Image (cartoon, rainbow, N blue to C red):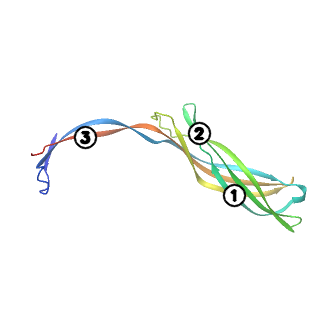
Amino acid sequence: MEDSFALPDNRSERKKITSTKKSSVREIITKAICGSAQKNFLYCCEIEFDQEFIPNQILGTSITAFTIHPVSVKFEHQRPIVIVSGSFDVNVWFSFNNGKDTEVAREVVEFSETLEIDDFDPAAINDMEGRAVLTKTPQYKGAIIQNNNTIKVDIEIGIYAEVISETKIRVQCYKSEYEEDS
């Protein structure tokens, strides 16, 4: 099929362009997200106290210093698994000595989780790298004083992980021939 059309007058050096539409398919290799997963995790942290600091009441909690370490990717049953690890600090403000004194207790929580990549593209052709971000910052879900001089704190976090690799995509290409007057 041949199409021809005239160019605007301001480009007088090219009077007519003839396009012969010959289609071909090309493979392009590019880095892309080849799979992802998202999951929420619930952690339970127990802070133990000495006899002199037996808590009477929980006055407040905060979660600070959240870090995610570099992630790793491995294969299990021909599917990638992203391993995410990191840590955060749990701070609990409490009263003791029958409410006469207060103190803040701090506990570092280390975590390591695996996320199975469900929507994995098998066209990935090279080594894979992983990336993880928070979808839900660590949130305090509840705290209770237990009988054995401990405070139990429940925390929830959400993590999104993705696998990045080189992959092939196919694109339709058209060739055009240009006629020029000299």
Q: Quadrant of residue 169?
A: top left
Residue at image point 67% right, 53% down:
156
Residue at image point 55% right, 45% down:
131
Question: Residue 29: image x %, image y %?
Answer: 39, 37
Q: Residue furthest bottom?
A: 100
- Residue type of the residue flagged with mark 1: Ile
Q: Which residue is mark 2?
A: 72
Whole-Å distance between the Cαs marked 2 and 1?
A: 25 Å
Whole-Å distance between the Cαs marked 2 and 3?
A: 41 Å
Q: Residue furthest front?
A: 182
Residue mark closest to the camera, 2 vs 3: 2
Secondary-structure class at tag 2: strand
Q: Earlier in the sequence, mark 2 or mark 3?
A: 2
Which numbered circle lies on residue 63? 1
- Residue type of the residue flagged with mark 2: Ser
Residue at image point 62% right, 46% down:
69
Question: Residue 110: image x %, image y %?
Answer: 70, 47
Q: Residue furthest top?
A: 77
Residue at image point 81% right, 63% down:
103
Quarter of the figure with the C terminus = top left
Whole-Å distance between the Cαs marked 1 and 3?
A: 57 Å
On screen, residue 20 versus residue 51, left or right, reads left
Q: Is residue 136 above or below residue 98?
A: above
Which numbered circle lies on residue 174? 3
Secondary-structure class at tag 3: strand
